């Protein structure tokens, strides 16, 4: 935890005047991912779980699809470099990785998908269901785990869950990075994502929705708002989209049939 | 305003049970920017002020530096296309626009700068100063203007101000887009940015700090948290960085000398 936070001098002004204090500031690390000896990309991220981030990024980009393909992952935390060696079937120069869609993210992100990917994405048919009470309980636990967020207000969290428990949890200054860390750990630890649930602290725009749909995850829960494109894609792809979960309130935007009425199971 | 919001059917669950309602959802538009007849990039953005966004994006990317270079900007809102024609000195194929730094944004953004740009960025020497009371008043007004945010929780806001007034204000689902819209309007309307102040709803990571520093803006105010790299860069570049402005509280992270004690002027 302390790896991701630094104490820095801050002048705090309140109605009682000014105090010179030390306050927690979230760290940001430029991380270069080298795939098969070729520099692929540099992400700005939180300096935690860099191996999971690198593998998850490669998986989301469609460059790695199973643990078996990965021969070695070495992390040089000090220099901000992760080297991933795969079975060699993929060379970064083989294809234009970064299609020029810049995502809304909190700004202008490289898309790891292209609008033309959408028709290729199959409909999610999982029969997984969840009750409203289970949603509230999971999100309360998710909140509790978001320690860094609570102390610095600077990071996003993402988690893979079943209907009762958080199975994998990660944090990052980037909402895409947080989810990629979750998927990276799932891939490396053989944790199935099928029939499971993703919770994110961040907004659900189209590229976030597609990233989760690509993993065949049937239920996506956000503490924040979705966009209209996120809602439409969730509807079309058969993904249950729940947003604005706050206390005992939530909005269901698409495929409500997976949310059971409370008291029934 | 209504252009940026759509009413969509939502199942709202509260402790009183379920209601089927229509709720406001923020719109997301893929916007393709075509520069001198070449497709440059597609941004995911809010469908507001697309001309300002396109020009601001080009300015932040260093592809346009003055209004005089721009011969024509045409917006096709329905198709999501902005065509910008410049005096022809720049052709997109001339250089690799998108260096492979993926920014933290809320995830993975194309960087419009490169870490190697930092040494080229001069120190901001503006003598502009602001009082704590002026900061609180400006941020309260900024909050008041953030109408879309208040009704849907889905967008970022950015504003150019002097010490007393908001001069330019924009919103977007992307925090970088919101600031680019501000800079685009400034460029097209000949509104000076020198000696002025930027307020943003979003986090201050290194790429956000650099984007503002490039415009020689001496004071950056955020409602959210900065990262350690944002704080360090602000210190090195002579930019006054104020974060976590909430009610009558704020934190000054760098170059505090531009913040006057209250009551003195």
Image (cartoon, coloured by chain):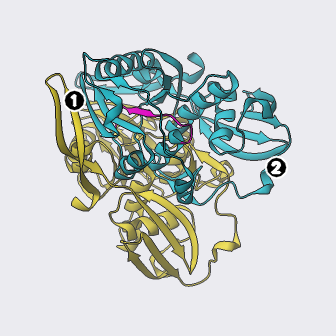
Chain colours: A yellow, B cyan
Query: In the structure shown, which secondary structural element does the residue marked by tag 2 occupy?
Result: loop
Cα separation, mark 1 vs mark 2, equals 48 Å
Return the residue at label 1. Answer: A13
**What are the residue bounds of the magenta stretch?**
B214-224
- The residue positioned 52% from the left and 58% from the top of the image is B115
Q: Compare residues B16 and B159 and report the one nearer the observer.
A: B159
Badge nearest the viewer, 1 or 2: 1
Quarter placement of the C terminus of chain A: top left
Find residue A226 and report its horizontal and vertical position in percent: 46, 35
Badges 1 and 2, same chain? no
Q: Nearer the viewer, residue B141 or B82?
A: B141
Drawn side of residue B248 relative to residue A61, left or right: left
Q: Residues within 10 Å of mark 2 (few under 14, many from 20)?
A: some
User: Is residue A239 visible to the viewer in this orientation of the structure?
Assistant: no
Q: Say which chain tag 2 marks.
A: B
Indicate whether residue B219 is drawn in magenta: yes
Q: Which residue is mark 2?
A: B91
Q: Quadrant of residue B88?
A: top right
Q: Position of residue A81 (x, y in %)?
A: 45, 72
Q: Is residue A80 above or below residue B256?
A: below
Q: Position of residue A197 (x, y in %)?
A: 36, 51
Q: Say whether residue A125 is magenta.
A: no
Give the main secondary structure, helix, strand or loop, of the magenta stretch. loop
Given the current orientation, which residue lies at the most extreme left position?
A16
Left or right? Give the position of A249 relative to A71.
left
The quarter of the picture where residue A132 lies is top left
Compare residues A182 and B61 and report the one nearer the observer: B61
Using the image, name the chain to which the residue with label 1 belongs: A
């Amino acid at each position: 935890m302390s790896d991701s936070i630094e104490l820095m001098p801050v002048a705090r002004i309140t109605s009682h005047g000014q105090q010179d204090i030390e306050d927690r500031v979230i760290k940001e690390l430029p991380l270069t991912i080298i795939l098969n000896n070729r520099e692929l990309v540099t992400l700005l991220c939180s300096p935690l779980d860099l191996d999971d981030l690198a593998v998850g990024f490669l998986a989301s980009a469609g460059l790695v699809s199973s643990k078996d393909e990965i021969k070695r992952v070495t992390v040089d935390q000090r220099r901000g470099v992760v080297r991933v060696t795969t079975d060699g079937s993929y060379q970064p120069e083989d294809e234009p990785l970064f299609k020029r869609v810049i995502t809304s993210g909190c700004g202008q992100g490289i898309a790891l998908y292209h609008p033309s990917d959408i028709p290729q994405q199959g409909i999610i048919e999982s029969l997984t269901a969840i009750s409203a009470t289970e949603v509230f309980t999971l999100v309360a636990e998710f909140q509790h785990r978001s320690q860094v967020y609570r102390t610095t207000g600077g990071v996003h969290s993402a988690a893979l869950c079943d209907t009762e428990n958080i199975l994998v949890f990660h944090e990052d200054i980037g909402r895409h990075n947080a989810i990629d860390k979750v998927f990276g750990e799932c891939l490396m630890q053989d944790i199935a994502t099928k029939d499971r649930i993703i919770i994110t602290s961040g907004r659900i725009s189209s590229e976030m929705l597609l990233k989760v749909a690509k993993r065949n995850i049937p239920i996506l829960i956000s503490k924040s708002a979705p966009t209209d494109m996120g809602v439409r894609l969730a509807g079309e792809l058969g993904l249950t989209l729940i947003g604005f979960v706050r206390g005992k309130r939530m909005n269901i935007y698409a495929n409500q049939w997976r949310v059971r009425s409370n008291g029934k199971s």
